[in-house]
Amino acid sequence: MNVKYSVIGAGSWGTTLAKVLSENNPDNEILIWDINQQNLNDIKKFRENKVYLPGVKLPENLKPNEDISGMVSDSEIVLLVVPSHTMRETIKKIKSSLKFNKIKAIITAVKGLEKDSNKRMSEVILDELGMEYANKVIALSGPSHAEEVSRRVPTAIVAAGQDLEAIKFVQDIFSLAYFRVYTSLDIIGVELGGSIKNIIAIAAGILDGLQLGDNPKAALVTRGMKEIQRLGIRLGAKQETFSGLSGIGDLIVTCFSKHSRNRFVGENIGKGKKLDDILKSMVQISEGVKTTAVVNQLANQMKIEMPITKEVYEVLFKDKDPKIAIEALMTRKLKLEVE
């Protein structure tokens, strides 16, 4: 095994993508690192991530590694699957070990925005590594719950970046019979679609918690996409991207799936539970909570109308009654649908 690929983050999605890489590249060595030593121990001892993917057997060429610096220094790709609020810290930890001429791709599979800077994950990476890495940074996004992909349920996602050769390389190393990867040159739209849809998913969960049925959720998803497009286009994304897998595709699966952590948060809010209690009860992170605060701030700064985001923010952080938030949305000034 001469070629090494590194995966940073052994949560459910990081482990799943490492499994995909291992299956599609059986002659390569896939190294995985995590801040939680127990996850690495379980993978090594049981060939299984018992906390995040119980019952899913992992390939032999997927190997846990405790030396993050040594791991990335010997790798052709680095796949980052860490919480958005730790991305900058993670890049700072590894940047002195990266070898520019050896690295073919630095991939982010993180669907979130950085608090305070309001930046996408690819922007955070380039902040720390420098713009010479711009053609090597790729975003991987789309409708893809780890619980299904890890069990080889047919799934399609998007790899996006600035350099077509690098994007196609990532497409090739990930694509399997059950995991189809498309390409895109709109990394802005792909990252924003994957991040902002989590806000709408929290709102969808609130509707589920209130047992309001199908009509409001259909309206929510439709108008939610309008908000995502409104902000995305202002930030430089292409409108057609939001009609694709990383846009409407990811929005649909996150708003309707039992696997969605963000929908789960909203559902429990709708049932009357407090946000802090919900988050404390969860093993995994709900990126949508932090993203709601970031996007609400962005919308206010840029004077962009995002009423659903505003109401979700007030429910999460201002303790607004969800029923009153829904009424506020329904009684807004009447307008043309295309606005």
Image (cartoon, rainbow, N blue to C red):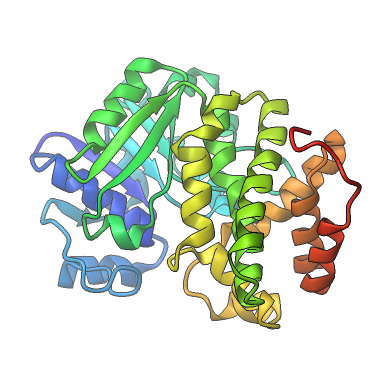
Image vertical order of residue 251 relative to residue 119, above or below: below
Q: Tell me, yes or no, if residue 114 can be seen here.
A: no
> Which one is nearer the viewer's eye here, 321 or 139?
321
Residue 75 vs 31, above or below: the answer is above
Q: Residue 286: x percent and y percent? A: 56, 63
Q: Quadrant of residue 328?
A: bottom right
Report the side of 140 relative to 180 (left or right). Answer: right
Residue sitting at 49 percent across and 18 percent down? Answer: 132
Please state which of residues 146 and 25 is positioned toward the viewer in this rendering. 146
Q: Would residue 43 be found to the left or right of residue 337 on screen?
A: left
Task: Report whether 90 appears left or right of 216.
Answer: left
Q: Is residue 22 above or below residue 96?
A: below
Q: Residue at position x 43%, y 66% from top?
A: 259
Most distant residue in the right direction: 333
The answer to which image quadrant residue 214 occupies is bottom right
Q: Residue at x 42, y 50 (%)?
A: 81
Residue 240 at x, y percent in the picture: 54, 26
Q: What is the x, y in percent for residue 227?
A: 71, 41
- Report whether residue 135 is seen: yes
- Numbered marks: total: 0
Image quarter (top left, top right, bottom left or bottom right) of the C terminus = top right
Give the percent coordinates (x, y) of residue 152.
21, 55
Q: Quadrant of the N terminus?
A: top left
Residue lying at 30% horizontally and 59% vertically, measured from the top left: 148
